[in-house]
Image (cartoon, rainbow, N blue to C red):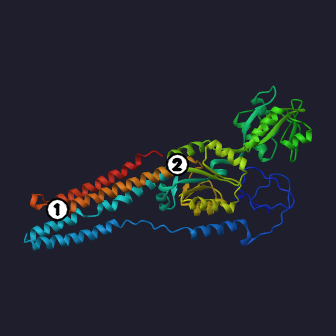
Amino acid sequence: IKGSSNVNESMITGESKPIAKKVADAVIAGTINGNGSLTVKVTHVGTDTALAGIMRLVAEAQRSKSRTQILADKAALYLTIIAIVVGIITLNGWLLAGAGLAFALERLVSVLVITCPHALGLAVPLVTSISTSLSAKHGLLIRNRLALESARNIDVVLFDKTGTLTVGEQGVADVVATGKLDVATITKLAATLENDSEHSIGQAIVAFGKQKKTATGTVSVADWQSLPGKGVQGVINKNNYHLGGPQLLLHLKITPDSKIVARTKQFAGQGKTVLYLIEKSTIIGLLTITDIIRPESQEAVEALHRLGIQVAMVTGDSNDVAQYVATELKIDTVFAEVLPENKVSKVKELQSQGQKVAMVGDGVNDAPALTQSDVGIAIGAGTDVAIESAGIILVKSDPRAVVSVFTLARATYRKMIQNLIWATGYNVLAIPLAAGVFVNQGITLQPAVAAILMSFSTIIVAANAQLLRKIKL
């Protein structure tokens, strides 16, 4: 199917590195073909496609998720009823006691003024308004207020690996010099060899060379040739070089020494792909390719641990790759080799253990898990389906922003409780005073004084809410 340059296509494979396919293998629409040509037979259309299946999972998660009742601010209504009831009792009580109509009406007015639910009515909405403003200022878009309220109780944050904790693209992780040349020269030679390559790994090496400011492209490569499934070869400064993986060694009939074999096994155990740079018939350097971990990810995981929140990771990648990332970032729980449709089951598994789960993802295949989780957090650079399934959206692809969600949620809740305690406690003490309970002790509350106290309580609630702006996100 020929695409158009103005059409955005979504990948739903979830793989961070190229996956080899052979005749009769299944492929998913939207997958990018690295090189070569292929003929595809369409076997599923309409409701049978992978995307339709993911949409069904989202719908099922939405239906199965328990409905949490949104706490409405009924306190103001109850306080109004209390004011009326107490006012009537006060008026009739003093009339029956023979205090006179003027005194009874004065007590009634004092009760109604002091019980005005102004402060109580502002206690929650004002904090909500400020927290919404703060979240937007720091790149957190709140699509569902319930999501932010629920975030304060989260026990586990479940990250999708590819594109969330990692960059989601292949990159060079290590460069090792195994001969007389230094690392900078190895990098320059490799980037120069791959300069004309269209393969994703080749482009990753070229990008790494530019990052390290090696002069790629300034040295001509003669007799350059791509060796499909093996690597590339070319002549630089009259020397013949090859760059590729294990198949290249077999092709050239080169046997690496024990030190190189040991380093290769070490890198392979970390889930990295090892490439060999060969001059003539000698291995002069190693390059490793992997899905690069975001530099911010480690800081995010450490900050979550300081908040007392466990960190889990789910990925479709191999167990070796997953364990390497988990070890580097000190992640508590790892779910590896998980199919897209099974990510939601991992969320349910954690929830079945009594855990409150926040899911962080960016892809189409994360949508069901985002919907099923107690709090769904989508990366803003992710797909539309993921964003629509989440309650909170991170504008930037920075996992540290996840920490800000929980920090803001906890601070917002504290301010709400403080304001409610003040507004409620103030009325509990002020109503008996306004009703004239302490008249025999010579203590009365005039309506004008009641109005001043009522305004003072409102100022305190508003000032306390403004202190929310001082939190560091």
Residue 244, quarter of picture: top right
Q: Characterize the local packing of mark 2: few (<14), some (14-19) or many (20 or more) Cα atoms within 10 angstroms.
A: many
Which residue is depicted at the point 79% across and 35% down? 262
Dots 1, 2 in contact, CB < 8 A: no
In the shown orientation, is residue 159 left or right of residue 137?
A: right
Q: Nearer the viewer, residue 201 or 306?
A: 306
Which numbered tag is attached to residue 303? none
The x, y position of residue 67, in whole percent, is 50, 69
Instruction: Kindly state the secondary structure of the residue where label 2 is placed.
Output: helix
The x, y position of residue 216, in whole percent, is 77, 35
Instruction: Kindly state the secondary structure of the residue where label 1 is placed.
Output: helix
In the image, farthest residue toward the top: 180
Disc 1 to disc 2, C-alpha distance: 48 Å
Quadrant of the image for the N terminus?
A: bottom right
Q: Is residue 423 visible?
A: yes
The x, y position of residue 43, in whole percent, is 80, 69
- Is 26 placed above or below 285 here? below
Q: Is residue 385 visible?
A: no
- Residue that mark 1 sits on: 447
The x, y position of residue 385, in whole percent, is 63, 62
- Residue that mark 2 sits on: 403
In the shown orientation, is residue 407 left or right of residue 262?
A: left
Q: Nearer the viewer, residue 57 or 473?
A: 57
In the shown orientation, is residue 226 left or right of residue 185?
A: right
Mark 2: which amino acid? Val
In the image, farthest residue toward the front: 353
Q: Nearer the viewer, residue 351 or 121?
A: 351
Which residue is depicted at the point 56% across and 45% down? 300
Which residue is depicted at the point 29% across and 56% down? 458
Which residue is depicted at the point 32% across and 66% down? 76
Mark 1: which amino acid? Pro
Q: Earlier in the sequence, mark 1 or mark 2?
A: 2
